[in-house]
Amino acid sequence: MSKYKIGITEAGDAGLDLSWVNKLDMVDGAIVITENVSPDFCDAVMDNKDKLIIHTTFTGYGHSILELNVPPLCEGLDAVMSLVKDGFPKEKIVIRVDPIIPTSKGIDTASRVIKTFIDVGFSRFRVSIIDMYPHVRVRFANIGLSLPYGDRGFSPNAEQVHAVNKMLGDVAAYGSSVISNETLMIESCAEPGLTNAIQRGCISSYDLHLLGLNDEISPDSYGFQRKNCLCYSGKTELLACKKQCVNKCLYCYWR
């Protein structure tokens, strides 16, 4: 049994739904995930900064048809930098490029996002490749967007995984010229084909260390939710939303 209970906000956007704040007393630490680093979110984070790690998502598609209500990259970057300036530790901010669309354009977009954040001193990233659920394929088709895996495909083929993996290797090489190669971390969970990424759960032993916690049972020794998932078994959801949030991302797994 896990020693700690670690909250996470996967059922919604923690920058828009602040109900997680009232649940922090029930957990030993939390990972809060958002595409919207809003002023209210920043205030809540600063009030609880010792207990939190932030995952902030940037795909490069903010304010596009894919992410209608998500701020554009430049605006989101300014908000994150303001949070750091206010005193939130940069090492406790993870830049999520999630999901990557494994087309030539999509891979170039992901590379540009990662390099943008490397250039301003961020060193920890999380990536995934888009899952094309049946309802997501319908959304794409309804607005005339091509389907990256065809009419029935859910997952990338080997060539597409290889292309994303190569990009991650190229980005890592770029990062080594900007920041220390020892500190650059590109992570993924349940993406075993991405060998140029560290296979690490969204909640890991590294995160426990950042939160000042120590569990004798390794959080990284077995999966928790689904095949190849590496998340700590003390993971608990802090949001209750079971539908698309107001971001209305076209690739959202909620119907």
Image (cartoon, rainbow, N blue to C red):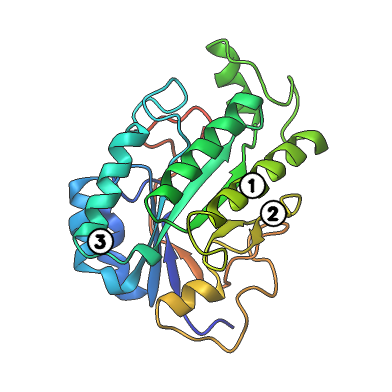
Q: Residue at x 64, y 73 (%)?
A: 220
Res 48 quadrant in image? bottom left
Viewer-side residue, 57 vs 75: 75
- Crowding at mark 1 (Cα within 10 Å: few <14, some 14-19, many 20+): many
Residues tagged 1 and 2 counted as in contact (Cβ below 8 A): yes
Q: What element carries label 3?
A: helix
Placement of 181 over or under 26, stated as above or below: above
SS assignment at label 2: loop
For the residue marked with disc 1, what is the amino acid?
Leu
Q: Mark 2 points at which residue?
A: 196
Amino acid type indicated by mark 3: Val
Disc 3 and disc 1 in contact, CB within 8 angstroms: no
For label 2, count other residues whose C-alpha is less than 10 Å away and answer few (under 14), some (14-19) or many (20+): many
Residue 16: x and y in percent read 28, 44
In the depicted structure, whether residue 50 falls above or below residue 145: below
Q: Which residue is disc 1 drawn over?
A: 168
Q: In this view, does 22 lie to the left or right of 106?
A: left
Q: Name the residue under label 3.
A: 45
Where does residue 238 sit, x and y in percent of width and height? 39, 60
Q: Looking at the picture, which amino acid does disc 2 mark?
A: Asn
Q: Is residue 254 visible?
A: no
Residue at point 68%, 25% (across, down):
148
The location of residue 56, given as percent across then percent down, is 39, 50
3 or 2: mark nearer the eye: 2
- SS of the residue under disc 1: helix
